[in-house]
């Protein structure tokens, strides 16, 4: 090659190397673990400042006065809610809140009955192992061991994994924040700082916000270490509130000291768990999130920062609760990731994205009142559950004894009338408790007594009205079938209205769901399903039999339409969203409809009905699972889990919820056995005197299937037995001393 040509070739090669070598080097660096640049200085990138603490409630903040001035000012412009923290157990620790953020799901970390402290000595600096970060959570192997067998199968390090996939640079301030950002091995690749003074907090926040998109702050630890507050375990509630307020003031000062436009920073302040180290129902916690300039202007960035109120504030909600002013702590990780640009289908854990509710009070004081009222109702509902169930259980026992064993009552027509009225009142209990739940009973000085009183009054009123209507021999029928039809229809209608409205009556009700348990906030809960299923099957059996006798084909068509409507109410994603209930109800309806139509029941036909039920409910759930995560319901999420690696976890959790109490609480298990034996004895005694119609097997099938498929299995069996037993007494009276009766 000629020298000139050689020089030209070398020059061209050098030019190409200069152009492509930096890009290639950058690509290799990007693919190498532990070598990503954790500094992001672009001021236009969205940023999130997450300030976490524990044991701080809205009532604490609102009653603190000037001790929480910064918190209250911040909350005025924020999207606010009650945050429900649950670990799936009756005990909660500060570490649980940070691990919930780390995994995006329910998790608990207890060493026996002692809570593991969240302290600086959790970290061990390891500058040698750069590939896994310079900091490591020293007790991580113990945490892995403690959480390995938990029902929600938490994936430790999931939050850090999602942040890494997004290329988000994060920073931790305080030991709890380091736990939140730890990876699956307990390593923290993000910068971790431990400020020791108020000035350190400001400078640390200013530097972290400038160089990171996500800054996580452990306010409880900073209050102790940098501001001289008492340790959270030793401090009183006012001291915790003052500590959080002081930390928030220093953090905001650091934010303004940075070079970042504050309107590009989303700020979330949340109490990640309560201080329920011992068995307790728990409490709702403080949550406020906004992009806000505290000097007067409110920004608009992120899912939880838009609204129409005059002060820029609003109530928060999430797909997990579908209730204004209620979110879950498991939603925090998913919301932060969404604000940082994560697709909706890449949320962390079981959480959903928090958003601002439409409408709501226009003033901050109005929103504060809503949150206080919801916390008061949740606490009252949890406290009233046992007294109400005890009273109801005693009433059930009295009716059962009077109707079955007391001979002189069975020989007196007046006594039989009293027993039937008592049974009718018992059958009206589900509807009357729902009605009482809308009276504001939780605002009284004695909530449990008020709820029992209101429920008794409504039950008495319904009993009187139904008896008066039945006396008129409506539709030419005897009184007793009319009473059964009316009480079943009333119960069916009340539950349907409540479910369509979003379960506003049953939420916090002793015969509904308890928000502090964070199980279900909308749709058809297990208790409601028990009563709804019995009412539906009784209406199909009793009314359907009459319609088919009178109108034949048209009557049967009406029965089928009603059955389809009932299934839609129970299963439809936007209404009941009840997967297990649908699987249990449809086979029962198939049996009832076939019996009403006069078709002989065979095992093959029953099996086809069960298979059809499974296909129908799975199809509805699969369609819901295809929708975006932000609008997906409980049903779609459950079905989606069945096709994922969470299948075994989901099924095991449901089984443990249904029957785990028999092993974990032997006294409860013994009580269940005694109740089952008593119920079997009652059925045997009545069996010799009445012949139930064929369609009544539908109730038995649905009861067994519902108990096996739902995580409240034993409770479902008990509620269905109570309601259907009361209807039997209403229909047939006390146990007679004559040969069998057979009435539809």
Image: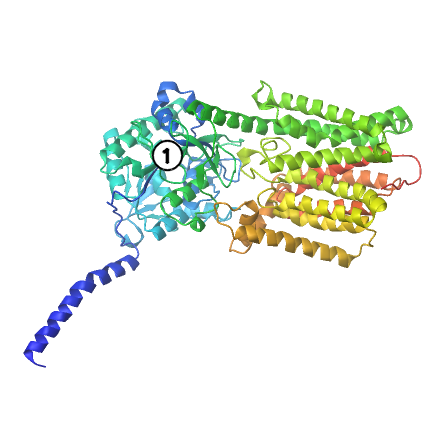
**To which quarter of the image does residue 685 belong?**
top right
Identify whether 123 is placed above or below 505: below
Whole-percent x and y of residue 688?
88, 41
Q: Residue furthest right?
A: 738
Horizontally, residue 620 falls left or right of residue 8, namely: right
Neighbour tally class for label 1: few under 14, some 14-19, many 20 plus, Cα within 10 Å: many
Q: Residue at x 30, y 50 (%)?
A: 133
Where is residue 507? Give x, y as percent.
Answer: 58, 33
Residue drawn at the location 75% of the way across and 30% of the way down? 426
Residue 230 shows in the view: no
Residue 715 vs residue 211: left or right? right
In the figure, residue 410 lies in which quadrant?
top right
Q: Quadrant of the N terminus?
A: bottom left
Q: Name the residue nearer the viewer: 110 or 571.
A: 571
Colour pattern of the rendering? rainbow
Residue 705, given in percent of the width and then of the height, sits at: 69, 48
Relative to 402, residue 135 above or below? below
The quadrant where residue 743 appears: top right
In-front residue for pair 570/376: 570
Q: Residue at x 8, y 74 (%)?
A: 7
Relative placement, left or right, of 598 versus 722 is right
Q: Is residue 124 above or below residue 68?
A: below
Q: Spot the residue most to the bottom.
A: 1
In the rendered image, the quadrant that contains the C terminus is top right
Residue under label 1: 290
Percent across and percent down for residue 648 are 55, 53
């Amino acid at each position: 090659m000629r020298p000139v040509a050689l020089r030209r070739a070398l020059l061209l090669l050098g030019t190409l190397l200069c152009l492509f070598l930096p890009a290639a080097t950058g690509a290799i660096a990007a693919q190498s673990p532990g070598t990503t640049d954790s500094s992001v200085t672009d001021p236009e990138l969205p940023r999130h400042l997450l300030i976490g603490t524990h044991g701080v409630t809205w009532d604490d903040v609102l009653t603190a006065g000037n001790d929480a001035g910064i918190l209250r000012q911040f909350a005025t412009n924020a999207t606010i809610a009650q945050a429900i923290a649950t670990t799936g157990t009756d005990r909660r620790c500060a570490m649980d809140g940070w691990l919930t953020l780390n995994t995006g799901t329910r998790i608990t970390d207890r060493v026996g009955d002692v809570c593991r402290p969240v302290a600086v000595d959790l970290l061990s600096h390891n500058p040698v192992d750069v590939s896994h970060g310079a900091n490591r959570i020293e007790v991580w192997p113990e945490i892995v061991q403690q959480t390995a067998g938990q029902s929600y199968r938490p994936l430790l390090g999931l939050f850090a994994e999602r942040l890494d996939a997004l290329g988000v640079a994060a920073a931790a301030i305080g030991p709890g924040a380091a736990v939140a950002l730890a990876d699956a091995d307990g390593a923290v690749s993000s910068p971790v700082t431990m400020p020791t003074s108020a000035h350190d907090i400001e400078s640390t926040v200013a530097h972290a916000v400038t160089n990171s998109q996500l800054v996580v702050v452990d306010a409880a630890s900073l209050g102790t270490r940098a501001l001289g507050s008492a340790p959270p375990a030793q401090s009183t509630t006012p001291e915790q509130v003052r500590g959080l307020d002081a930390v928030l003031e220093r953090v905001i000062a650091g934010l303004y000291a940075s070079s970042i436009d504050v309107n590009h920073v989303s700020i979330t302040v949340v109490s990640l768990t309560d201080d329920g180290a011992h068995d307790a129902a728990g409490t709702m916690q403080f949550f406020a999130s906004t992009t806000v300039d505290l000097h007067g202007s409110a920004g608009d960035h992120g899912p939880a920062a838009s609204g129409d109120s005059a002060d820029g504030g609003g109530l928060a909600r999430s797909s997990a609760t579908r209730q204004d002013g209620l979110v879950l702590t498991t939603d925090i990780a998913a919301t932060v990731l969404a604000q940082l640009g994560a697709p909706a289908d890449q949320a962390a854990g079981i959480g959903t994205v928090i958003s601002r509710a439409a409408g709501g009070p226009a003033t901050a004081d109005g929103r504060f009142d809503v949150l206080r009222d919801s916390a008061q109702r949740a606490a009252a509902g949890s406290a009233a559950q046992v007294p109400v169930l005890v009273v109801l259980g005693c009433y059930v026992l009295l009716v059962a004894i009077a109707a079955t064993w007391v001979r002189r009552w069975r020989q007196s027509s007046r006594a039989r009338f009293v027993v039937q009225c008592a049974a009718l009142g018992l059958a009206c209990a589900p509807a009357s408790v729902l009605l009482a739940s809308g009276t504001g009973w939780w605002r009284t000085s004695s909530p449990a007594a008020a709820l029992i009183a209101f429920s008794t009054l409504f039950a008495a009123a319904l009993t009187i009205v139904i008896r008066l209507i039945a006396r008129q021999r409506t539709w030419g029928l005897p009184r007793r079938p009319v009473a059964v039809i009316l009480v079943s229809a009333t119960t069916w209608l009340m539950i349907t209205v409540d479910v369509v409205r979003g379960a506003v009556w049953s939420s916090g009700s002793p015969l509904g769901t308890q928000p502090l348990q964070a199980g279900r906030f909308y749709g058809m809960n297990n208790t409601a399903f028990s009563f709804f299923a019995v009412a539906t099957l009784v209406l199909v059996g009793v009314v359907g039999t009459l319609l088919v006798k009178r109108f034949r084909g048209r009557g049967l068509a009406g029965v089928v339409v009603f059955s389809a409507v009932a299934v839609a109410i129970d299963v439809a994603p936007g209404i009941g969203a009840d997967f297990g209930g649908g699987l249990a109800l449809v086979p029962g309806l198939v049996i009832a409809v076939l019996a009403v139509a006069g078709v002989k029941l065979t095992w093959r036909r029953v099996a086809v009905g069960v298979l059809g039920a499974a296909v129908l409910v799975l199809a509805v759930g699969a369609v819901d699972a295809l929708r975006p995560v932000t609008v997906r319901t409980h049903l779609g999420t459950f079905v989606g889990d069945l096709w994922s690696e969470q299948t075994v976890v989901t099924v095991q959790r449901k089984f443990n919820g249904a029957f785990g109490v028999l092993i974990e609480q032997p006294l409860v298990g013994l009580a269940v056995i005694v109740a089952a034996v008593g119920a079997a004895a009652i059925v045997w005694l009545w069996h010799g005197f009445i012949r139930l119609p064929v369609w009544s097997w539908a109730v038995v099938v649905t009861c067994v299937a519902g108990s096996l498929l739902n995580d409240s299995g034993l409770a479902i069996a008990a509620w269905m037995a109570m309601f259907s037993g009361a209807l039997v007494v209403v229909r047939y009276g006390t146990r007679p001393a004559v040969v069998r009766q057979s009435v539809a």
